[in-house]
Image: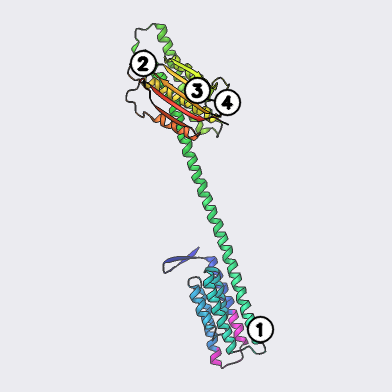
Amino acid sequence: MSDTTTSPGRTVRYTVRDRVTDAVLIAFAGVMVLVSWSLQVNGPAWLLAADVVVGVLGCVALWWRRRFPVALGLVLGALSTLSETVSSAAIVAVSTVAVHRSPRATAAVCATSVAALSTHQLLWPEPGVPPVTMYVIIALGHLAVVAWGLSVRSRRELVRSLRERAVAAETEARLRAERSEAEARETLARDMHDALGHRLSLLSVHAGALTYARDAPAEDVARAAEVVRENAHRALQDLREVIGVLRAPVGESPVPAVEDVLELVDEARQAGTPVELRDEAGLTTGAGKISESQGHTVYRAVQESLTNARKHAPGAPVVVRISGRRGDDLVTEVTNASTSGPPAYPGSAGAGAGLTGLAERARLVDGELDHGPTGSGGWRVRLRLPWPS
């Protein structure tokens, strides 16, 4: 529960705790007014009565100490020159300035209050007490109040800083989680494109063969139908694996390795694409070792290249060359010759999306991808990765 007070240029909210604190301080100042008044013995009755009235008004004014701390501190401090009972309210105002305002404002209000009380002591000295002693008490009392106020201010600033840090850390953690989620979705989209695009291109090739080769022997038709059935089954398996990434914990989803390139080559050959594999680095046989992320990138590069060759140059021979050695770059190059036949997917939508994703894969492992036509009318995809140290 809180109440709201509007001041020029801003709105200040006060909690119940703030108001209770204000009431306690006003009550304390009021008690000190009564104590001070009871100890006064010099002066006419009307002057003592006026002093008490000023002291009571100063206590009431403390209700607005949070809104106008500096102005209230200066006014009450100045009144302390003539009124002894208002000095307690002036001290409370000094502590308020120390808690809520800058050190410069605190010094100004404190100096005003010290000067006013010292002047009052000079005009109406305390009987039986040396003036120097009273001046020292006034100065030390103000220093103690200011020190207490500054310590409260420092503690509040520390708590506020810790809260801001906690909010910033929470925001940073949320942004990291969102970024990780976006990267995971992008990786999933690339995997789905690579895996399903590869399988569906095989299905298209064999289904097309069944469509146009109506006079083929029954044995060939059955073999082609079996390939279609098998690749449809594998496409479903790939789809389940990709969807499984959404459910499996991090690190438990299956990741193709560079050794699986041999399976890609066999599938392409069964689909009617003449593929020659030149593994000079010995990665597919296990003779050479690279990191899992690099092996996955090489696998996807070969997969995407074979898929594109079947799409755009069906039947054209393809050469897959993997070369490199320690201290040098690992280069995977897939080249297909030109073909005189029409592409399997003329004007297919989304052309180039796979190569764009592949280039992003290469960048994530500090590699680079380039592709383009060859001088003989074919197409070449070249992936360069740093050889792991």
Which of labels 1 and 2 is toward the front?
1
87 versus 159 height, above or below: below
Question: Which label's residue is closer to the chain start, 2 or 3?
Answer: 2
Badge 4 density bin: few <14, some 14–19, many ≥20, Cα 10 Å: some
Which of labels 2 and 3 is toward the front?
3
Asked if marks 3 and 4 touch (Cβ < 8 Å), the reply is no
Between the C-alphas of marks 3 and 1, the distance is: 95 Å
Residue sitting farthest toward the bottom? 44
Q: Position of residue 73 (x, y in %)?
A: 52, 76
Determine whether, in the image, residue 107 is placed left or right of residue 11: right
Of residues 222 and 251, the one nearer the viewer is 251
335 versus 110 height, above or below: above
Residue 208 is marked as 2
Between the C-alphas of marks 3 and 4, the distance is: 13 Å
- Can residue 187 be seen here? The reply is no
Q: Quadrant of residue 227?
A: top left
Q: Position of residue 208 (x, y in %)?
A: 36, 16
Q: Which residue is mark 1?
A: 133
Q: Which residues are magenta?
A: 31-48
Instruction: Identify residue type, mark 1.
Output: Thr
Badge 1 density bin: few <14, some 14–19, many ≥20, Cα 10 Å: few
Q: Which residue is mark 4?
A: 289
Instruction: Identify residue type, mark 2.
Output: Gly
Residue at image x 56%, y 63%?
Answer: 156
Question: Which label's residue is closer to the chain start, 4 or 2?
Answer: 2
Q: Which residue is mark 3?
A: 322
Callout 2: SS: helix
